[in-house]
Amino acid sequence: MQTKITAFLQDISSIAKKLKDSLPKNCIIFLNGTLASGKTTLTKAIVKEFGKTGVTVTSPTFSLQNRYGNDLFHYDLYRVSFDEIIDLGLYEEFDKDGWHIVEWANEKLKTFLESAGYNTFNISINILDLNSREYTLGV
């Protein structure tokens, strides 16, 4: 089932709260959207919703993973193929308890993690205009 929500960027905390209230404690969240659609902006709102203060949330474009405390993990896999994820052992990170927020996950990785029994959730972000987005939550 999918839910579509339109929100202004200044109200993005409502999306983060909805996610925190409805998703399981351990979950892999796939963020889909074009460049500059707001994937990292949503991640910032989620980190804030979890009460993580004093951390700088940036897209881990070159480090591949940022960690916010012991239960929030943020990945940017734009430049990484599925085979590289396997070769690097990065897939083992998903065994850690908490939320794993993944930008730019490829379909092969999604299928692999879903078939391994992980809780997964998809969020697609569509730019409506400079200040608003449509979020499609769910499968």
Image (cartoon, rainbow, N blue to C red):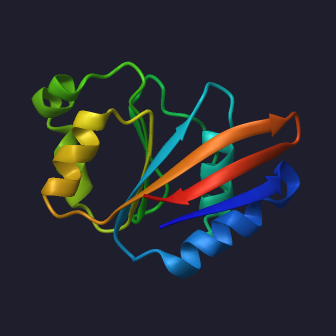
The answer to whether 92 is drawn above or below residue 17 in the figure is: above
Residue furthest to the bottom in view is 21
Q: Which of 10 and 97 is in front in this view?
A: 10
Query: Measuring 33% from the left and 32% from the top, which residue is drawn there?
Result: 106
For the C terminus, the quadrant is bottom left
Count of marks overlaid on the render: 0
Q: Quadrant of residue 115?
A: bottom left
Residue 132 visible from this viewpoint: yes
Residue 92 lies left or right of residue 36; in this view the side is left
Q: In which quarter of the image is residue 46?
A: bottom right
Q: How far from the left and from the top, in percent, is residue 5? A: 71, 60
Residue 34 lies left or right of residue 114; in this view the side is right
Residue 16 lies left or right of residue 7; in this view the side is left
Residue 50 visible from this viewpoint: no
Q: Nearer the viewer, residue 38 or 7?
A: 7
Query: Measuring 68% from the left and 34% from the top, which residue is drawn there?
Result: 37
Residue furthest to the front in view is 1
Q: Which of 105 and 57 is in front in this view?
A: 105
Residue furthest to the top in view is 79
Q: How far from the left and from the top, in percent, is residue 25? A: 39, 76
Residue 103 lies left or right of residue 35; in this view the side is left
Query: Measuring 74% from the left and 36% from the top, which residue is drawn there?
Result: 127
Query: Measuring 11% from the left and 27% from the top, which residue is drawn there?
Result: 87
Q: How far from the left and from the top, in percent, is residue 66? A: 45, 43
